[in-house]
Structures are given as C-alpha cells and as structure tokens.
Image (tube, helix red, strand yellow):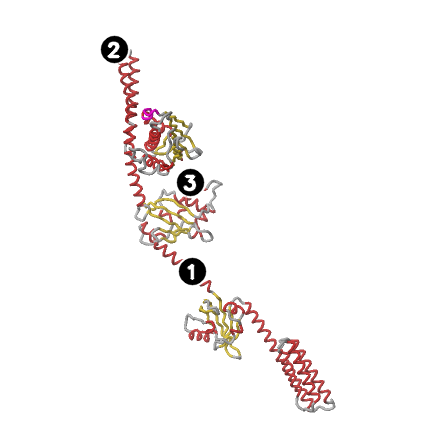
C-alpha cells in the first residue's frame, strides 16, 4: 500500500474510533484502538507521520472524553481515558524507537550496498537474510531471488576443507577466512576470498559473509607461476649458456661518472681502471647448467660473485657492453673469450639484453654460445682456402711465365752489356779504371734488381700464413702491375693507373692483396682477348670517405652477361673453357677477410668494373 493510502486509512480508523467512543454507550477503553491508527501511520516509515497520528489520537481521546463526561467527578471513565492515553504514548514511543532502529539499519544497508565486495547475511541454517547490490551484480541473482535461499546450495560453494570443520572454527573464534569456489547464475566459476563473522543478537546467531572476487587475480598469479616455471625449464634445459646479472651497481657508478664532456667510449678507453672496477660491479645472480658446463664448474654457487672472473685480462667486449648499457640500448652483441675454471679459453658469441625499468638493471640476461667447433671449422676452412690460393698462385705463375722471363732477362742482359763494356775499358792500353768502376756498379745494381724480382716471385708463390702489416696501397699496386706487365703487353692491352695522392695505409697481407689485383687484371685482359679495337684497363685508387679507400679495375671488354652476374663469385663457376672457377671466389673471401668488400657492375657491350673497398688502418687514420 502507498504512503498516501496508509495515511488515509490511519485517519479513517482514528475518526471511526472517535465516533464510536462519542456516540455509543460502551464503557470499555475504546480509545485504546487509536493504537492501530498509529501503527498504520508507522508503516509509512516517516517520523512526522507517526507524530502527527499520535498527536491527533491524543486530541481525539481527550475531546471524546470531554463530550461524553463532565469534569465534576473523577470516575472510571477518566481512568479509562488515562489508560488509553498511556497506551497511545507507549505505542508512539515504541514506534519511534523502531523507526530509529530501522533508519539506522537502512543506512547500514546502504553502506553495505556501496561496497565493492559481495556481502550477504545468513542465519545458522544457511538461509540468506540480506543480499547487497554487488552480490546481485556479481552472482546474477536479485535480492528477491536470493533471500530465503540456502547460500551453499544457491552458489554451489566448494570449500578447500570440510564444511563441518569450517563451521566449528567459526563457532570457536567467531571468524573464519579462506578461499572458496562458487558459481554464478550463468554458471561461470568464481574464485573468492571469503571472510565470515558470527553475529549474536536476541533473535539468534547470524553470519555476515564478505566475499572478494579474486578470479582474475588468481588467474594472473597462475599465469605468472606458469610463466616462471616455463622460464625456469627453458633456463635449465637450454643448451645455450644463460647468465642472469645485477647491473644496478654499474648504473650507480655510471651516473656518478664525471667525463668532463668527453665521449664515454673515449673516456673509458683512457681510464681502464674504471672498466676493471665496473667488471667487478656486474654481479652474477644465476647461471644455467649449460654455462656451468661451458666454464667447467660443478654448480652455480661458484659464479655468485661477479662477471670479472669469467673474462680474460685483455677482454675488450665488456667496454662495448658498458657503452651500450649507458646509452640505453636494449641489446648488445659481441664475441669474446670466456676463461673457464681450469684455465681454458672458450671462444663465444654473446647477446646481452637490458630489460626496461624499473627492475631492468637487476635482471640483465647474457646468452652465451660456445663457438669452439665453429672456430675450428673456420680455421680448417681458412687452411683449405690457403691451399686453394696457393694453387691459384702457382697456376697464375704459369700464365705469367713469359712476363717473368722477360723481367728477369732484362737485368741479366744489362749485366752482360755492362760486363762487356767493363772488359773493353780494361783491355785498353791505359785502362780507364773510373769507367770500369762505374760499369761494375751497373752490374751490381742490375744483379740486385734480378735478385729482387726472383724474391718477389718466390714470395708470391710461397705458402705461408697471412701477415697483417702496414701497407702502402700504391706499392702493392705497383708490384702487382709489374707482375702482369708482360701478359698485358702480349695481348696488346694498355694499362692506365690513376692513384690519388697521399693515400693512407691499410693493414693486411701484401701477397694476398697482390693476388687479388693480379687476378682482376688477368681476368680483365682475358675478357678483352680477341676483341677488335683498343683494349684498355683502367686501375684507379682513391678515398671514399674518412674510413674507406676504393680500388676499381675497369676494362673495355664485352661486359658480363646478366645471367652470370648472380653466380660470378660462386666457387667453381667459370666462363672459361680451361678455368677452375676459384679465382673470383678467393678474391672476394680475401677482401672480406681484410674487412672490405668486392663487387662488380657491368653493362653488356661496355665492359665490366670491379669495385674493391678496404678500411684504413686505424693506427694511421686521419683525425
């Protein structure tokens, strides 16, 4: 019934009681019935309605008494009126108290409805007597649907312990906390943290249950645990060595470093003591079994110190890693040697990952790959390449035999001529000793020249380990062109050499670079063999930038067919009937071993141009 209806019926009842009290000869305490009118007004839950109804009932009681009785004597009617007034007063007081209690409970219920947790109250039998808004939203049942239902049956609650033991703990301590599984109205599974509190009142024992939905949190934690287990399995089972390090001390040291505005790499290169100190600050926190085996250790405990004990005294890779770390790079790769616990030096490739903040400095991961077998295979490959290069030089020598004979024959002919001239000066009646001495000097000079030619040829043929020397590229070009001069003249090929003045030196093996140039010049000459018209090879050398110089060998031959360009540097690919297909492959490998590149461009009908680049020697690079 609405509030207006309750007010109407309360007023109607009060008026009816008044009429009965005034118009009928009943001697009873009819005015007591006004209590019903007050109770009806109380159903509106408005304090003012209760007070108005009570006041009206008092007024009506007194009015009815005055209309029905006089005031000359105090008899039983007056006593009945007082009883009625007392009943009205007591009822009003009780109703107002009940209204105040109800208001407080309603306020508390509103607070419970504001909670983000699911809250409901049940009696000792498990029947739900209160169900807040969050419980409605989370579980899916409205308050009307939930009230009066058994909580465990409605929510299909699953406990981690026996239900009887939980209830006994609740009765013993008045509280219980735990994690339970429940189901929503739609059937979805929820994991909740439950907190129960036992309440005692005059109506019996009730239980306030507060539930926090931790389904997502439990799922996230489970995923984290799974990820951690997966990471640990990969960490332990990986055949790649993995080191976990704490670089937070390094970060502090770098932040406090005063470089005076100098480049960090240059500063560290000039302050090796700081680098050695920094190596000791890179603290190892964990090492997987693969790295333990690589370093010859029996367990990870031997590593829980710092990275310094794994690196050699002359290691330079840590400096590069330090610069990458200071510059905020996410990754750094390099090659170095680890020093094992038994003193062996293990060549390795490594990758360092620097995770982002906030805990990145404490979780630096270093992945290490043992490349001992690869190094051995590489050494074997280089040895085989040296054998092939030697064979190629011997084959080249056969092709240059006429040029070599011409070169050696020139000083021999000059020696014979000078000797004959000296004999004529001696056979004179008066020998001219001054001329004889000059002639003998010519003989000695030409003999030395012949010796140098033979030495150069023997060196070219000699199978020796590569030498890393400081070389003037102009001298290398001069010696190479001298070796092929006769071969080029035989094919009527004109060689033009254009050298930039003041070329910086390069570091490399003189014989290997000579072989590259000889092969390129011989190939260019053979490409133009039998061609009508002029045959010209142009060899140029000059700087490209502040770090690189370039040598180009350009011919005026027919060029290289487009179909052959992609395979030109492949081993055993050749366009010659009697070729081995190793010359250009060896040339490219040799140039790359010197830190350079060898490429070719060609336009059919317009010749080919080979581009060879080499880095400057860093010791003599221009500032």
* Residue 589 in view here: yes
**Disc number for residue 427:** 2
Q: Mark 3 falls on what kind of element? A: helix
Q: CA distance from mark 2 to mark 3?
A: 72 Å
Label 2 CA crowd tier, 10 Å (few <14, some 14–19, many 20+): few
Q: Residues within 10 Å of mark 1 (few under 14, many from 20)?
A: few
* Real-space Cα separation, disc 1 to disc 3, in angstroms: 46 Å
Counting residues from the start of the chain, the first of labels 1 and 3 encountered is: 1
- Nearer-the-camera pick, 313 or 522: 522
Please give the range of residues in magenta: 487-492
Most common SS among magenta residues: helix
Disc 1/disc 2 C-alpha distance (Å): 109 Å
- Whether label 1 touches label 2, CB < 8 Å: no
Q: Nearer the viewer, residue 166 or 571?
A: 571
Q: Residue 269 got which mark?
A: 3
Q: Position of residue 27 (x, y in %)?
A: 67, 91
Q: How many marks?
A: 3
Residue 538: name its quadrant: top left
Q: Quadrant of the C terminus?
A: top left
The secondary element bearing badge 1 is classed as helix
In the picture, the disc for residue 223 is 1
């Amino acid at each position: 019934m609405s509030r207006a209806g309750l007010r109407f019926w309360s007023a109607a009842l009060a008026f009816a009681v008044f009429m009965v009290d005034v118009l009928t000869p009943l001697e009873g305490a009819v005015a007591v019935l006004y209590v019903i009118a007050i109770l009806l007004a109380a159903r509106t839950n408005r304090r003012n309605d209760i007070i108005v109804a009570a006041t009206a009932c008092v007024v009506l009681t007194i009015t009815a008494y005055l209309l029905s009785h006089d005031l000359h004597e105090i008899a039983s009617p007056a006593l009945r009126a007082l009883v009625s007034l007392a009943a009205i007063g007591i009822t009003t007081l009780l109703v107002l108290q009940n209204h105040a209690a109800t208001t407080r409970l309603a306020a508390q219920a509103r607070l419970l409805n504001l909670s983000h947790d699911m809250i409901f109250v049940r009696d000792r039998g498990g029947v739900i007597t209160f169900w807040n808004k969050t419980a409605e939203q989370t579980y899916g049942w409205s308050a009307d649907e939930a009230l009066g239902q058994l909580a465990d049956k409605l929510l299909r609650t699953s406990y981690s312990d026996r239900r009887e033991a939980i209830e006994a703990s609740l009765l013993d301590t008045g509280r219980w906390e735990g994690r339970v599984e429940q189901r929503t109205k739609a059937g979805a599974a929820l994991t909740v943290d439950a907190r129960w509190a036992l309440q005692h009142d005059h109506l019996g024992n009730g239980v306030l249950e507060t539930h926090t939905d931790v389904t997502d949190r439990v799922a996230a934690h489970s995923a984290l645990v799974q990820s951690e287990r997966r990471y640990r399995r990969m960490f332990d089972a990986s055949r790649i060595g993995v080191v976990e390090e704490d670089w937070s001390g390094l970060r502090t040291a770098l932040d406090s470093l005063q470089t005076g505005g100098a480049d960090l790499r240059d500063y560290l290169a000039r302050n090796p003591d700081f680098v050695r100190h920094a190596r000791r600050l890179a603290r190892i926190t964990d090492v997987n079994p693969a790295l333990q085996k690589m370093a010859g250790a029996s367990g990870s405990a031997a590593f829980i110190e710092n990275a310094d004990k794994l690196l050699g005294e002359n290691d330079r890779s840590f400096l590069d890693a330090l610069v990458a770390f200071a510059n905020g790079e996410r990754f750094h790769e390099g090659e170095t040697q680890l020093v094992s616990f038994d003193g062996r030096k293990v060549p390795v490739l490594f990758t360092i990952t620097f995770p982002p903040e906030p805990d990145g400095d404490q979780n630096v991961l270093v992945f290490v790959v043992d490349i001992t077998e690869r190094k051995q295979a590489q050494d074997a490959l280089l040895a085989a390449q040296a054998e092939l290069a030697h064979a190629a030089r011997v084959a080249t020598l056969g092709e240059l035999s006429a040029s070599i004979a011409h070169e050696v024959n020139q000083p021999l002919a000059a020696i014979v001529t000078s000797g004959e001239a000296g004999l004529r000066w001696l056979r004179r009646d008066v020998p001219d000793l001054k001329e004889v001495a000059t002639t003998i000097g010519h003989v000695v000079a030409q003999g030395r020249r012949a010796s140098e030619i033979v030495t150069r040829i023997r060196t070219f043929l000699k199978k020796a380990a590569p030498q890393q020397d400081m070389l003037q590229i102009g001298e290398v070009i001069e010696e190479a062109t001298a070796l092929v001069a006769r071969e080029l003249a035989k094919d009527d090929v004109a060689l033009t050499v254009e050298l930039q003045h003041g070329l910086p030196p390069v570091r490399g093996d003189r014989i290997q670079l000579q072989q590259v140039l000889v092969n390129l010049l011989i190939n260019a000459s053979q490409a133009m063999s039998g061609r009508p018209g002029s045959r010209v090879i142009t060899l140029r050398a000059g700087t490209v930038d502040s770090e690189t110089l370039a040598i180009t060998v350009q011919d005026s031959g027919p060029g290289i067919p487009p179909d052959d360009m992609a395979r030109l540097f492949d081993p055993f690919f050749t366009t010659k009937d009697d070729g081995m297909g190793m010359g250009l492959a060896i040339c490219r490998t040799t140039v790359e071993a010197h830190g350079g590149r060898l490429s070719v461009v060609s336009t059919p009908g317009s010749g080919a141009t080979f581009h060879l680049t080499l880095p400057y020697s860093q010791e003599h690079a221009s500032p």
